[in-house]
Amino acid sequence: MKGLEVSCLQLGLERQRRPVLSEISCVFKPFELTAVVGPNGAGKSSLLQALAGVLAPSAGHIELDGQPAERISPAQMARLCAYLPQAETPAWSLRAADLVALGLLPWGRPKDRERRVSAALQLVDAQQLAERPVTRLSGGELRRVQLARLLVGEAPLLIADEPTAALDIRHQLQLMHTFRRQADAGKTVVLALHDLPMAARFCDRILLLEQGRLVAQGTPEDVFTPALIGDVYGVTCEFRWRDGVADFVPLDLL
Ligand SMILES: Nc1ncnc2c1ncn2[C@@H]1O[C@H](COP(=O)(O)OP(=O)(O)OP(=O)(O)O)[C@@H](O)[C@H]1O
C-alpha cells in the first residue's frame, strides 16, 4: 500500500471568529500512529477536522504528499482519508452492516463488499451486531460499529476522534492493537486521545496541544514527563515506565 504523508505548515484555524489553532507545524507519516492529546478545549478535534478537510484553515497550509489540501476534490479526499468524529448520532435506523458499508462508498460497490464489511465488524468484535438497527445499540456497541465503518475502506489516512472513549477496557485494547496493525501495514493513523497510558503504550508520536498551540511533539518518552504534562493539565503526576508501558498516576491538582 502506498502511504500518505500529511504536513501542517503554520496552520491556524478560527471558529466563530475566535482563534482555536495557531501556528501548528507538524508532519504525520506512513507507518506512524500519532496521538493528539491535551486538555478539554485545547483544539484536538479542531486539528483532526482540519486534517480531514472538514474545516478550512484560516492561516497556513495542509499538504497531502506535497499537494495542497485545498486542491484535492471531495471525492479524492474521501478515498485518501477516513475520519470518525468525536460524536455522531445515527440519523436513520440502518442495519449495522449497512452503516459499515457506507465506508466503502468512495470505492463504488466492490464485489467483495459483504466479506469486507464482515471483516471490519470482526476487527471491533461486532459481527453479532450486523443485523441490528443502529438506533437500538448501546453507546459502546454503536461506537464499535462506527469504528468498523472507519476501518472498512482503503484510505491510507485514518483519523479518529477519541475512538476509545465509549469502549470497555477489553475493546479499548483490541481497538488500539487494530490501529497499531494498521500503522504497521503503512497507514498514517491520527487519534485524539485522553487516555495517556494508552497513547504511551501504542503510539509512535505524541502531539501535545494547549489552548490551540502545539506545546510539544515527540515520542511518548519525550512528551510524557511530569513537568510538561503537569504544567499543561494543571496537575501533579508521575509516569513510571516499564518496557515502554507507562503507569500514569495523576496525584493532585496544581
Ligand atoms: N462548533 C464550534 N463552534 C465554535 N467554537 C467551537 C466549536 N467547537 C469547538 N469550539 C471551540 O474551539 C476550541 C477547541 O475545541 P475542540 O473541540 O477542538 O477541543 P478539544 O481539544 O477537542 O476538546 P475536548 O477534549 O473537550 O473534546 C474550544 O475553545 C471550543 O470552545
Image (spheres, rainbow, N blue to C red):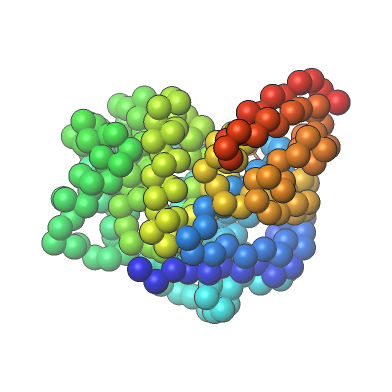
- Figure quadrant of residue 175: top left
Which residue extends farthest front?
243
Residue 25: where, in percent of width, then height? 71, 64
Residue 55: where, in percent of width, then height? 59, 59
Q: Is residue 164 left or right of residue 12?
A: left
Look at the image and tell me whether residue 182 can be seen.
Answer: yes
Tell me which residue sits at (65%, 34%) in the image: 241
Q: The N terminus is located in which quarter? A: bottom left
Tell me which residue sits at (28%, 46%) in the image: 120
Residue 66: where, in percent of width, then height? 56, 79
Residue 235: where, in percent of width, then height? 80, 28
Which residue extends farthest top?
252
Q: 240 and 109: which one is in front?
A: 240
Q: The C terminus is located in which quarter? A: top right
Which residue extends farthest left?
111
- Figure quadrant of residue 250: top right
Look at the image and tell me whether residue 53 can be seen.
Answer: no
Q: Quadrant of ligand 1?
A: top right
Q: Is residue 139 left or right of residue 115?
A: right
